[in-house]
């Protein structure tokens, strides 16, 4: 495969603080680097990320920062020369970023949505803030972290030319079982989200109340101080990625909780699912359509809707937990590593590369559209 030059304009690669995108980008870009592709990641300088950086000098790509949208003009020639430019979801001033880069006339203009169901819900309400509905038909490829009917909606309801599933992935060099002794019976890793909290309250908090002899942990920032955690729940404010594998490995089970829009859409696996599986930690998840396509139940996954159901899973012996964790581990190593996902991305980009005269035609169309 011919090496590609790719520019990614994403939320943040340098900091995982309150940012689930970071580990997804790191796994994907590491895979692209292993395959010999050249990647430049452009990140908007933001004080909250600058103060909490846990990756400064990646070995698999070039990381550069820009102060504002106007500064992207200094990268115009690089953006035009790249085989593909991929703009991510939740990029600050994303609509303006897309318009600006589109006017540069990149060879392939792509969007990577790591929040597809949330994006579609916002666009349906008419309040998208990082991509506009008018922009969707002008992407050469719309990569979506959600599959299933989300792809049909993108094509049929929003005029996307080509929608492709590009699920999250995990870097097996960064995630794996450590062999540490179990410290918690059930843990959860994730930034606070209001629409996830009722499920956490039921599946973890109430479980902790019903089963005081079990030990629990919740790791992640931005949880309101008003939340009252039971005494057998340990709170960890922020857990950098370098400690994730240890955190997962010290749990008998880990909890996966999915945002409401993603449950409604289905086929929206969180990166946390893949990370836990890479550590051979069995998962208890809320239920949503498409989950079995990734980790079939009961072989590689348990699901629950009540604290009582969680308690039943926790009452299983260590042999059952180990068997389930190992099954998930085999699946993720075969299908959901950064190298696998990078191969999928590169294959799609290789097939989509356009001749120069078609790029010029697309650029004129974009300029005409921008002038309207």
Image: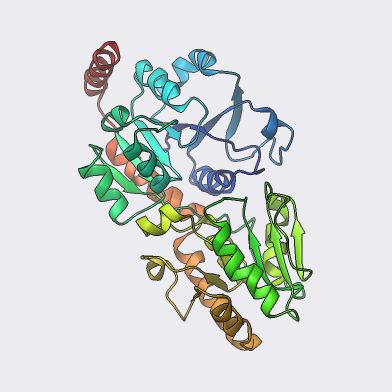
Residue 109 in sight here: yes
Residue depicted at x 40% and y 49%? 166
Taking the view exactly as shown, the residue that stands out farthest to the top is 371
Q: Is residue 344 left or right of residue 258?
A: left
Q: Compared to 361, does 164 lie above or below?
A: below
Q: Which quarter of the image is occupied by the N terminus? A: top left
The image quadrant where one finds the C terminus is top left
For residue 324, above or below residue 149: below
Dividing the picture into quadrants, the one containing residue 266 is bottom left
Residue sitting at 49 percent across and 35 percent down? Answer: 90
Q: 46 left or right of 329?
A: right
Closest to the observer, 363 or 271: 271
Point out residue 121 in the picture as x, y percentages from the top left corner: 37, 44
In the figure, 221 relative to 6: above or below? below
**Residue name at image x 45 percent, y 16 percent:** 76
User: Could you say where residue 55 lies in the image, as x and y percent from the top left?
Assistant: 68, 40
x and y, in percent, of residue 344 in the image = 38, 50
Is residue 1 visible in the rendered image? The answer is no
User: Which x, y percent locates residue 12?
Assistant: 59, 36
């Amino acid at each position: 495969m011919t090496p590609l030059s790719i520019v990614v304009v994403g939320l943040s690669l340098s900091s995982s603080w309150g940012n689930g995108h970071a580990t997804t980008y790191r796994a994907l870009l590491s895979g692209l680097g292993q395959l010999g592709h050249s990647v430049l990641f452009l990140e908007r300088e933001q004080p909250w990320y600058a103060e909490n950086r846990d990756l400064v000098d990646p070995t698999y790509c070039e990381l550069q920062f820009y102060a504002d949208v106007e500064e992207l003009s200094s990268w115009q020639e690089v953006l035009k020369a790249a085989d593909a430019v991929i703009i991510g979801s939740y990029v600050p001033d994303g609509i303006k970023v897309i318009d600006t880069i589109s006017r540069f006339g990149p060879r392939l203009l792509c969007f990577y949505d790591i929040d597809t169901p949330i994006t579609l819900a916002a666009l349906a309400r008419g309040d998208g803030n990082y991509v506009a509905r008018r922009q969707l038909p002008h992407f050469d490829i719309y990569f979506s972290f959600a599959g299933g009917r989300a792809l049909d909606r993108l094509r049929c309801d929003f005029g996307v030319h080509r929608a492709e599933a590009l699920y999250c992935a995990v870097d097996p060099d960064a995630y794996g079982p450590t062999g540490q002794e179990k410290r918690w019976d059930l843990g959860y890793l994730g930034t606070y989200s209001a629409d996830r909290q009722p499920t956490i309250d039921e599946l973890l908090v109430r479980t902790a109340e019903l089963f005081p002899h079990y030990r629990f942990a919740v790791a992640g920032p931005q949880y309101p101080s008003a939340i009252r955690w039971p005494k057998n729940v340990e709170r960890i404010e922020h857990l950098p990625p370098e400690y994730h594998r240890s955190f997962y490995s010290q749990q008998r089970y880990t909890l996966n909780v999915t945002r409401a829009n993603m449950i409604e859409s289905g086929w929206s696996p969180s990166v946390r699912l893949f990370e836990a599986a890479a550590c051979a930690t069995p998962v208890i998840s809320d239920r949503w359509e498409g989950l079995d396509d990734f980790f079939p139940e009961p072989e590689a996954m348990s699901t629950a809707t009540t604290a009582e159901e969680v308690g039943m899973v926790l009452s299983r012996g260590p042999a059952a937990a180990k068997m389930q964790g190992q099954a998930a581990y085999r699946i993720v190593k075969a299908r959901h590593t950064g190298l696998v996902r990078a191969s999928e991305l590169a294959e799609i980009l290789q097939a989509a590369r356009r001749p120069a005269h078609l790029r010029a035609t697309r650029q004129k169309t974009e300029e005409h559209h921008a002038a309207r």
